[in-house]
Amino acid sequence: GDPGTTPNNPVIGNMELKIVFYDLIYGLLRIVGNPGWDENQYVMKCIMMTCSMAGDDPQRFANAIWKKLCMALDRASKKSRKNPQYNHYLFESIAILIRSVCTKNVAHATSCENIFGPRLKEVLENDYEGQFIPYVYQLLALILEFSPEGGRMSDTCTAAFPQLLKLNRWEFSRNIPSLTRLLIAYLRKGIIQTLNHQSKSLDDIVVVFHVLIQNENYKQYTFDLLRAIVLYVPPEVRCFKEVLNVVKFEAMSSHPTRLSNEILSHFFTLFVAKFGTKAFYDVFDCKSNDLAINFLLYKWIPSLLS
């Protein structure tokens, strides 16, 4: 093929795109903004690629682009017949724009939440077939990830947290990556402190953890959630203790069925780094250190050497 068309050597580069960006993006948005024209996946893909390649340019026109993409999102969410490819490019375009704007200034994360939060909530309410759930939670996670740690969590985000933990959301494998990512973003942002350690939703974290450990295909997401629990959940909170009890049981089992030695070893490496060796021995809750030493000798160290 023509080397000029490869991804590493595109025919139109960033510099050329900058010259025509304004005219190109506004021409594309006029098509998207016309409700009389059907959803065109090629136009939306072009918007996605243009915003992706344009560097800082989308920031200068963010308000205009957001307005048109929000209109497109509103229309797409209300259609009984979905266009999966069009919707994919639409959500990816929104994600690229959020990342572009917030990378430059994380303070814009609040603006993104104000613009997209209510719309995404409405999308979820209208999404009876669940096609938009992975995309919506991916966008919410992206916004939360750009929000600075320690900042106040908005009432909108706090109110949405219990919905995230509804078990029926976690029944479909397509939802697991974005749901896990959003849950971790909530923990990092400080949802535990916002809810004052007492909410029933915190107990639902344990239910979600059990969903993940039952499926070998979710091993990476199990580890990611365990890591977030160690880093962001205070050890005195009940959900932390309950998750730790599951880990302890698996660590003491001669044939762990739900958590691999690799996950157990990674977990305790992080656990010891944060809480110290005494806390590690205390996990096994025994007068002698035999159980802890057996875990070290027969599971932890072999896992590290393999």
Image (cartoon, helix red, strand yellow):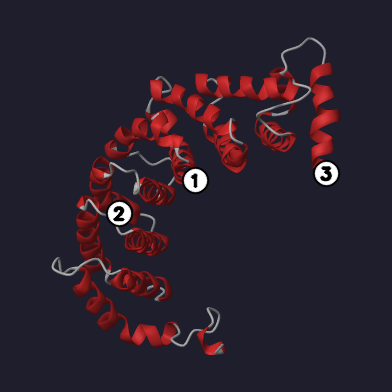
221 to the left or right of 189? right
In which image quadrant can residue 260 be found? top right
- What's the residue at 32%, 63% (across, down)? 86
Mark nearest the camera among 3 and 2 is: 3
Question: Dot 3 corresponds to which residue?
Answer: 306
Question: Dot 1 corresponds to which residue?
Answer: 177
The earlier-in-sequence mark between 3 and 2 is 2
Residue 19 x, y percent position in the rendering: 34, 87
Mark nearest the camera among 1 and 2 is: 1
54 to the left or right of 115? right
As drawn, 111 above or below 297: below
Residue 243 x, y percent position in the rendering: 58, 24
Circle 3 Cα neighbour tier, 10 Å, few/some/many (<14 / 14–19 / ≥20) = few
Residue 134 x, y percent position in the rendering: 40, 47
- Quarter occupied by the N terminus: bottom right
- Are the residues at dot 1 and dot 2 in contact (C-beta closer than 8 Å)? no
Q: Amino acid at mark 3?
A: Ser
Question: Dot 2 corresponds to which residue?
Answer: 112
Q: Amino acid at mark 1?
A: Pro
- Quarter occupied by the C terminus: top right
